[in-house]
Image (cartoon, rainbow, N blue to C red):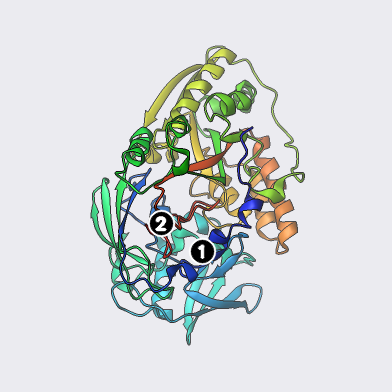
Amino acid sequence: MRRRHTLGSLLLAPLLTACFASQGGDLAGDASDGSRLRVALAFPPAENLSPYGADATLLSRLGVTEGLTALDANGAAAPALAESWRRENDRTWLFTLREATFQDGSEVTPAAVVAALTHATEARPLPAALSGVTLTAEAAGDAVRITTRTSDPVLPLRLSSPGLAVFAPKAYAPGEVDPVGTASGPFELTKVTGSTSATLDRYDDYWGGLAQASGIDARFIADGTARANAVRSGQVDIAEAIPVAQAATLDKATLEETATTRTTSLQLNTRSGPFRDPKLRAAAREAVDSLALVKGVFEEYADPGAGIYGPAVTWAEGRRVPPTGRATAAKPHGTSVTLATYDNRPELPEVAQVLQQQLQKAGFKVTLVVREYSRLESDALAGKFDAFVGARNSLVDTGDPVGVLASDYTCDGGYNLARLCDGKVDRAVAQAEAVTDTGERQDAALRAEAAILGTDAVVPLAHQAIIAGVATDVRGVLLDPYERTLVGTGTRR
């Protein structure tokens, strides 16, 4: 197995320690000028850069948005627009704001934050970080008081979600949010050209310090080979998600690899089609050979699927609970299924092709559908496919291990690709959500994970590392296990 940085070793990296909690810090220095950065992103906007869906991480990775809190290198809540907070009682928290301005020049006030959070609670679909959570916010002097309907011990973590970024009042219109020139991060979005490119300029009044790069020219390049070629030819300075098949073709000096909390999984539609039958789901699970995928497709830039949480989530190792209640596999007898995936991550179509062969060997008849993600997501969420191969970062939405379980596998989950609605699972997730102590909450999350795996609604395939292409003259790229950041005030060339 190829040696990779684990989450534990990443915690020692000074770059991440300096930059996770705030994109300011020592790296920003006294820069008053600087070159523009050319960045290639793998996912074109799927929702017109709405902060409430998959596009939220595009904005955070480009340094455009921030929320009340951020995640530090240990995965704990750290100050962002809120400089401090305290818990007033079981259901209420008080967040004291720092002095900051939005990119339109208006001040970050308690009223503005309240309006932003209220819009998020009314958004449809609901941001994944708010799955199963009801909150209200009110101004309280120079602070914001947030009250949840039930106790939420991880609210500061939840508010770090890219989907709960805070924008200036002018950003909000009925049914939409305009992020152009209205966020509060170190880079201001000034122009968006459809799904092909975006232009960002340095925001000189950013509270965290002046960015060293004068701006960013971002291109959305869904084709992984094209992203690798752009690095090789010097057309871009930074390219995310380099395909494993392309890694060997690039100069090693231009490759940066990081362990992540991302898991590639097979999601089985439990509400309609053949995989309503748990016995056929069990047959699909038994047909999967994860080790063959790791060796043949990921070229060992991954580990075999062990659960919803992978080895980068170091606290999960040695504490997993074996799944129980799994059905006995039935013979497929030529059952026809449609397997879908997207090509923004070029290894996924290869994974789907190998899975197609494995499932067919087990007796299924498999039709494969491959599209660009923005053309696939709505159909996948609507249950138009029997099975779906996707890559999901288990901690990207909230930093809380329970959050992804609530959003992806409960009856009311906003990103429930498996369309799972199981009383035992919902009870296990609800029990985990109620636990305050960190260690006990992790154990409860692992029990809920076992309940989910016991339904065979999801088959973990591989736990991935990410590979970025970075020009040799670029410094300060922010690669983190949660995949929320990419460029910040210290990123420069």
Between 148 and 252, the one lying in front of the other is 252
Residue 290 locus on image (x, y percent) = 61, 27
Q: Is residue 178 left or right of residue 352?
A: left
Point out the tag, 2 or 1, that comes first from the N-terminus.
1
Q: Residues within 10 Å of mark 2 (few under 14, many from 20)?
A: many
Residue 302 locus on image (x, y percent) = 58, 35
Between 487 and 145, the one lying in front of the other is 487
- Three-letter amino acid code at disc 2? Tyr
Residue 201, quarter of the rendered image:
bottom left
Residue at 55% x, 59% y: name it: 16
Q: Residues within 10 Å of mark 1 (few under 14, many from 20)?
A: many
Residue at 75% x, 57% y: name it: 440
Q: Which mark is residue 52?
A: 2
Q: Say which element carries label 1.
A: helix
In the displayed structure, 29 sits above or below 49; it is below
Residue 409 locus on image (x, y percent) = 57, 44
In the displayed structure, 421 sits above or below 456; it is below
In this rendering, which labeled residue sits more in front, label 2 or label 1? 1
Between 209 and 62, the one lying in front of the other is 209
Residue at 33% x, 48% y: name it: 45
Q: Which residue is mark 1?
A: 19
Q: Is residue 395 left or right of residue 223?
A: right
Residue 41 locus on image (x, y percent) = 37, 46
Residue at 53% x, 15% y: name it: 360
Q: Is residue 164 left or right of residue 17?
A: left
For the N terminus, the image quarter is top right
Q: How many marks?
A: 2
Q: Say which element carries label 2.
A: loop
- Three-letter amino acid code at disc 1? Cys
For the C terminus, the image quarter is bottom left
